[in-house]
Amino acid sequence: MKTNQIKDLSRLCIHTITTKPFNIEQAANNYSANGVKGITVWRDALQNRNIKQTGEMLRQHNLSVVSLCRGGFFPGKEQKKRQEAIEDNRRAIEEAFELGTNLIVLVCGADPSQSLEDSRKQICDGISTILPEAKAAGIKLAIEPLHPMYADTRSAINTLAQANDMTEALNSPWVGVAVDVYHLWWDPNLESEIERCGKNNALLAFHVCDWKSPTVDFLNDRGLMGEGCIPIKKIRSWVEATGFNGFIEVEIFSNSYWKQDQAMFLKNIVKAYQENV
């Protein structure tokens, strides 16, 4: 694919969390009106709604429901906590099925009271436990490695190599990886690891935003594409060299952008996508 084809919005997906002040109905109306073709739904956006009807509503707006975000958070020193996570992930599979998507993104979790190795084993065990339900529902599970700054509580999977290792260990066509540039842009092995997950047909999702410098909040100060230091076009070229031609998903957590007029912010997202991805 030539880089200038990105001006076509047919592969643009936006996460509901990106425009958090919009409820899901407002998101559907506004995304569709701006030519966006895909939506990834965060589970909080489904609260107090008929999930099946919500999925139908999204498709009526000509939006592909790309994925449900998020499952995961498997580790816990206490067995009770681990079992609660399993049950929550089973609910996520049910929600994804009702919504009409075939992918759940996993933010895998960690427990700072135990070693990262123990957390990783519990993540692998947790995914293995829910795999039969995921397969039965036709739902794939995407392990998303998170930046090492989140290794205490959000994820013990911090490099694409670790995600690839776990995917290979689980050895299931229903498990793959999600590549998010915010979390992985710094990794000197990123190109070769993207190539590796491509060879395994394990690249299930590609998320974009930018790393602002200086950043004022490591969780909620992500930038629009082109605002920061991530080589997004280069990483996109590596992703597409694997044969990946799925949606390019804009996922931005930003206290400052959430305070802005969301209709204008959405127009800026589309512009940044066309110019900087």
Image (tube, rainbow, N blue to C red):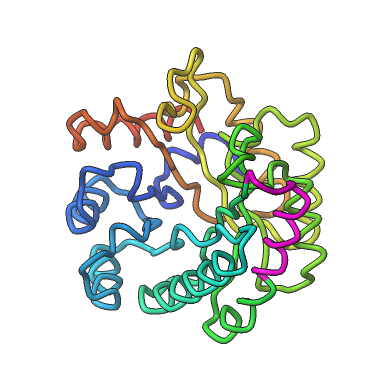
**Does residue 17 lie above or below 201 as drawn?**
above
At 31% from the left edge and 57% from the top edge, which residue is drawn? 44
Question: What residue occupies the far top of the structure in this picture?
Answer: 214
Say how many tags the image has.
0
Place of residue 246 in the rendered image (x, y in percent of width and height, measured from the top left): 55, 56
Please state if 159 lies on the left or on the right of 271 as rendered.
Answer: right
Place of residue 208 in the rendered image (x, y in percent of width and height, measured from the top left): 51, 38
Please state if 119 lies on the left or on the right of 96 as rendered.
Answer: right
Residue sitting nearer the eye, 138 or 71 = 71
Question: What residue occupies the far bottom of the structure in this picture?
Answer: 136
For the magenta stretch, what is the residue range? Answer: 112-127
At 47% from the left edge and 58% from the top edge, which residue is drawn? 70
At 61% from the left edge and 40% from the top edge, which residue is drawn? 152
Q: Specify whether residue 123 is painted magenta.
A: yes
Location of the N terminus by quadrant is: top right
Place of residue 248 in the rendered image (x, y in percent of width and height, measured from the top left): 50, 47
Q: Quadrant of residue 139?
A: bottom right
Place of residue 22 in the rendered image (x, y in percent of width and height, measured from the top left): 20, 47
**Does residue 243 lie above or below 255 as drawn?**
below
